[in-house]
């Protein structure tokens, strides 16, 4: 198994990547922004993605998106093929693309929004912290990507202030000087799960009323 910076030679996996992302969302019953093969190919051609391969077999993927003229960067579309799940591959992929992103965009804030508890935990271990949506990019192009998510009505109802997704942010400025580093709360799996459950309870209750 190897995880490499993707390029145009990996374009043959674009459709499979999109299908794997969509099928995973259906199984989990979560909302997710849809990707097209054409969009994935642009990420491959611009070296803005990493891909995990077992020989010639697709195993996993994640790509980089830049927003607000490079002030904010997201590691998006993290997916592991069903044949390679539950062996820690997602964490390895996220670490590779996180390190790659920090080299490519050293001054950018790295953020993500997700409903997945496992991804929240991986992000937290990398140094992300849970934040409000107001601390994320205000680039309209990013939020437009949420339109294909089944929970988009929640986002619009709250004036883009919150949704079932949890926003998480890595700010390099908070890590440069340990003496000035913000003290982080001891978030763990139970705390993240409680946060997720509270948000689901609030929004589902409002949707029924």
Image (cartoon, rainbow, N blue to C red):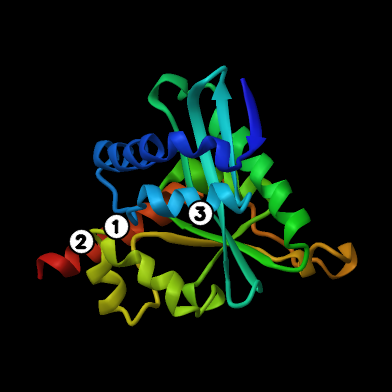
**Relative height, residue 34 to residue 56 (above, below):** below
Horizontal placement of 116 versus 135: left or right?
A: left
Q: Residue at x 41, y 38 (%)?
A: 17
Q: Residue at x 20, y 61 (%)?
A: 204
Tag 2's secondary structure? Answer: helix
Does residue 115 appear in the picture of this structure?
no
Horizontal placement of 194 versus 174: left or right?
A: left
Within-10-Å neighbours for mark 1: few <14, some 14–19, many 20+: some
CA gap between label 3 and label 1 equals 34 Å
Q: Residue furthest left?
A: 209
Residues at marks 1 and 2 touching, judged by CB atoms closer than 8 Å:
yes
| The label number, if any, that marks residue 204 in the structure image | 2
Quadrant including the N terminus: top right
Q: Earlier in the sequence, mark 3 or mark 1?
A: 3
The residue singled out by tag 3 in the image is 42
Q: Is 62 in front, or is 128?
A: 62
| The label number, if any, that marks residue 200 in the structure image | 1
Q: Residue at x 57, y 17 (%)?
A: 55
Foreground label between 3 and 1: 3
Does residue 128 appear in the picture of this structure?
yes
| The label number, if any, that marks residue 178 in the structure image | none
Tag 1's secondary structure? Answer: helix
CA gap between label 1 and label 2 equals 6 Å
Foreground label between 2 and 3: 3
Within-10-Å neighbours for mark 2: few <14, some 14–19, many 20+: few
**Relative height, residue 115 to residue 52 (above, below):** below
Q: Earlier in the sequence, mark 2 or mark 3?
A: 3
- Which image quarter: residue 114? bottom left
Within-10-Å neighbours for mark 3: few <14, some 14–19, many 20+: some
């Amino acid at each position: 198994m190897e995880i490499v910076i993707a390029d145009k030679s990996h374009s043959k996996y674009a459709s499979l990547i999109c299908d794997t992302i969509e099928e995973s969302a259906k199984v989990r019953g979560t909302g997710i922004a849809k990707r097209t093969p054409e969009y994935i190919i642009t990420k491959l051609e611009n070296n803005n993605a990493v891909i995990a391969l077992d020989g010639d077999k697709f195993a996993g993927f994640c790509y980089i998106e830049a927003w607000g003229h490079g002030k904010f960067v997201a590691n998006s579309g993290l997916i592991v093929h069903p044949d390679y799940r539950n062996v820690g591959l997602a964490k390895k992929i996220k670490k590779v693309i996180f390190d790659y992103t920090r080299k490519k965009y050293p001054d950018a804030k790295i953020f993500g929004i997700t409903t997945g508890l496992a991804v929240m935990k991986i992000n937290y271990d990398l140094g992300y912290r849970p934040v409000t949506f107001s601390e994320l990019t205000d680039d309209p192009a990013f939020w437009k990507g949420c339109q294909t998510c089944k929970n988009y009505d929640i986002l619009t109802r709250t004036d883009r202030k919150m949704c079932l997704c949890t926003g998480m942010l890595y700010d390099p400025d908070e890590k440069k000087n340990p003496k000035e580093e913000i003290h982080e709360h001891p978030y763990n799996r139970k705390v993240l799960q409680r946060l997720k459950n509270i948000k689901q309870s609030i929004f589902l209750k409002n949707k029924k009323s």
